[in-house]
Amino acid sequence: MKKSINILGVTGSVGQSTADVILSAPERFEVMTLSAHRNVDKLADMAVKLDAQRAVIADESRLDALKVRLEGTGIASSGGQEALEEAAAEPCDITVAAIVGMAGLRPIIQAVRHSKAVAIANKEPLVSAGPLVIAEAAKHRTALLPVDSEHNAIFQVFEPENRLQIEKLILTASGGPFRTWDRADMARATPQQALAHPNWSMGAKISVDSATMMNKALEVIEAHYLFDMPPEKIEILVHPQSVVHSMVEYADGSVLAQMGASDMRTPLAQALAWPERMKTPGRTLDLQAMSRLTFEPCDMEKFPATAHAYTALEAGPYACIALNAANEVAVDAFLATRIGFFAIMESVEHILAGLRSETLRTLDDIIRFDHSVREATAAYIDRKAGELKKEIKAVP
Ligand SMILES: NC(=O)c1ccc[n+]([C@@H]2O[C@H](COP(=O)([O-])OP(=O)(O)OC[C@H]3O[C@@H](n4cnc5c(N)ncnc54)[C@H](OP(=O)(O)O)[C@@H]3O)[C@@H](O)[C@H]2O)c1
């Protein structure tokens, strides 16, 4: 029996790796719906290649162009936010959530309600609405399959029946492109330099997050929700080679690790075939070619984002939402060269410092609060843009 599959965000880096895995084993999968934000050409190409039933473009103004591109193919098309949510609500065996940012939250909630399993790469909605996503999954008996390589690694070595004997989850981090840079050079870092990740080829937002190590901060929060582990049992360990993707340490001293090439097609193949296994079309590990694997502590002073994850978790879900929302806005501003590299964290810290505790119960509460933080961050950046840009030139 083929697995029916929806891919949200097929035109992105994770979406393309997902398509590779599916195309390598067409006998295993039947593609239902594919989505993108604005990239009509790639979406239409992928829909034809993957023999999809439907293509959805989130930006409704591009729907006419999509219709033209799909004419004569028999592939249905739709556009706009509502269409995206409707598509995500289409029942299927597995949905791959590969949209970037909080834009993926409503579609993920729909997928969790209507798919048998959701393979989640899109970490921001988990960071901001983890308790809600987990509760919906429990209510609808939907399997949540982590695709983020660290969480996928933990998922593979996590023994739920021995959860009380788990000493800690160890999230490995490459350290990003600036691990060995000094602060003066980091202050002047350009988007191009921040995007040049040493090990992984990824979308722009997560690449900048790797450079600030906000990516690891988001992953600490993601791990807390996905594996129901207290923050003090989640550790970050810098491992520049990105071979060991994460580990679980048990009370008897055993440390179970998952290893693999730095290629998203491995966690995706694991999630798509789960609970079976399938062959990856990606790179595999050549242990003999590897001279050494190294591990070092995370420098939380140099990369303060990592410390903010723990502070936000201690404060509560509202602080995790704010951390994520402020970061998304600041990363956009950095990529648009409106602010310098250090101003990303300065913007996030400004927002965190001004927060008051909020109780957010519903999806609408979360989205409303997320919007208010975005507005406050954008206003801060507007006020400070000129001043902050000087940081690019200044040596701290
Ligand atoms: N890349 C990795 O290796 C990796 C690893 C682990 C986790 N992740 C996580 O996976 C997610 C995707 O990352 P990525 O690197 O694949 O990102 P990406 O390359 O930027 O792709 C993002 C995808 O989301 C779509 N999209 C963007 N904004 C949207 C919106 N407002 N509404 C609907 N769709 C929208 C894009 O469509 P268009 O192409 O039309 O813009 C594209 O298909 C992120 O949350 C990231 O943190 C990524």
Image (cartoon, grey):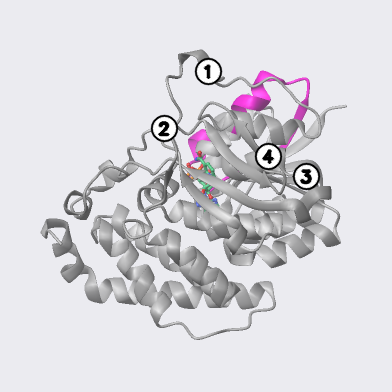
**Closest to the observer: 393 or 82?**
393
- Pick whichever of labels 2 and 4 is earlier in the sequence: 2
Cα distance between the residues tagged 1 and 2: 16 Å
For disc 1, the marked residue is 287
For disc 4, the marked residue is 254
Magenta run includes residue 329: no
Q: Is residue 388 left or right of residue 25?
A: left
- Pick whichever of labels 3 and 4 is earlier in the sequence: 3
- Position above or below: 383 against 105: below
For disc 3, the marked residue is 159
For disc 2, the marked residue is 199
Q: Quadrant of the N terminus?
A: top right
| Residue plotted at (16% across, 57% down) | 392
- Pick whichever of labels 1 and 2 is earlier in the sequence: 2
Residue contact between numbered discs 3 and 2, judged by CB atoms under 8 Å: no
Cα distance between the residues tagged 2 and 4: 28 Å
Amino acid type, callout 3:
Glu
Cα distance between the residues tagged 3 and 4: 12 Å
Cα distance between the residues tagged 3 and 1: 26 Å
Residue contact between numbered discs 3 and 1, judged by CB atoms under 8 Å: no
The answer to whether mark 3 is within 8 Å of ligand 1 is no
Range of magenta residues = 18-43
- Position above or below: 23 against 163: above
Cα distance between the residues tagged 4 and 1: 21 Å
- Asked if residue 312 shows in the view, the reply is yes
